Image (cartoon, helix red, strand yellow):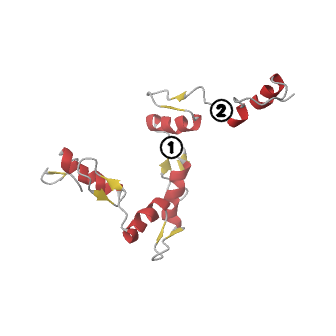
Amino acid sequence: EPEQSISEAKDESNSGRSTSKDASKKKPQRKSKHKCSFCPYTSPHKSHVVVHERTHTGDKPFRCLFCQKTFTQRVQLKYHETVHTGERPFRCSTCQASFNQRAHLEAHERTHTGERPFVCDTCGKAFPKKAHLKDHERLHTGEKPYKCSVCEMEFSSC
């Protein structure tokens, strides 16, 4: 016999009367989190932990049929393969430029709208791309992660 749902069991125990704590109106709570075997990372979704653990193990089970490059996630492989196929399904409605990833289209569309959603917490300056904000933030922190291979001089952006 199939198991009863929470709401069916509650209905039977209350002789069909509805209560203010009707289980069918509540979202089920996830009791246990799944934990990474290597670090403190946890997630209510086991699949997220499986993908995360690949950052520790180096496992890259998804291989490109064109160049043999490997990836930790199927979606990364799918995006990569568009480099070989030339597929560019994301098209700008303003100028018809096309892109292989939705995120690239969204960044491009900001050139038309002037939107600058990435804001510096230190000075309030806004940028159209997250990478531009990261470069800017280094002006405040003094971080210079890029080094010239010829003269050893360090820079905040490349």
Tag 1: residue type?
Answer: Lys
Nearest the viewer among 158 and 148 is 158
Nearest the viewer among 55 and 26 is 26
Distance of label 2 from label 1 (alpha carbons) = 34 Å
Nearest the viewer among 141 and 69 is 141
The answer to whether residue 146 shows anywhere in this view is: no
Quadrant containing the N terminus in the rendered view: top right
Q: Residue at x 58, y 38 (%)?
A: 47
Pinpoint residue 127: horizontal percent, then vertical percent.
31, 59
Q: Residue at x 70, y 30 (%)?
A: 20
Q: Residue at x 83, y 25 (%)?
A: 12
Q: Which residue is mark 2?
A: 28
Pinpoint residue 82: horizontal percent, then vertical percent.
51, 63
Q: Residue 5 is drawn in which quadrant? A: top right
Relative to 129, say whether 144 is above or below. above
The tag earlier along the polypeptide, 2 or 1, is 2
Q: Which residue is mark 1?
A: 60
Q: Give the secondary structure at mark 2.
A: loop
Tag 2: residue type?
Answer: Pro
Pinpoint residue 26: horizontal percent, then vertical percent.
66, 34
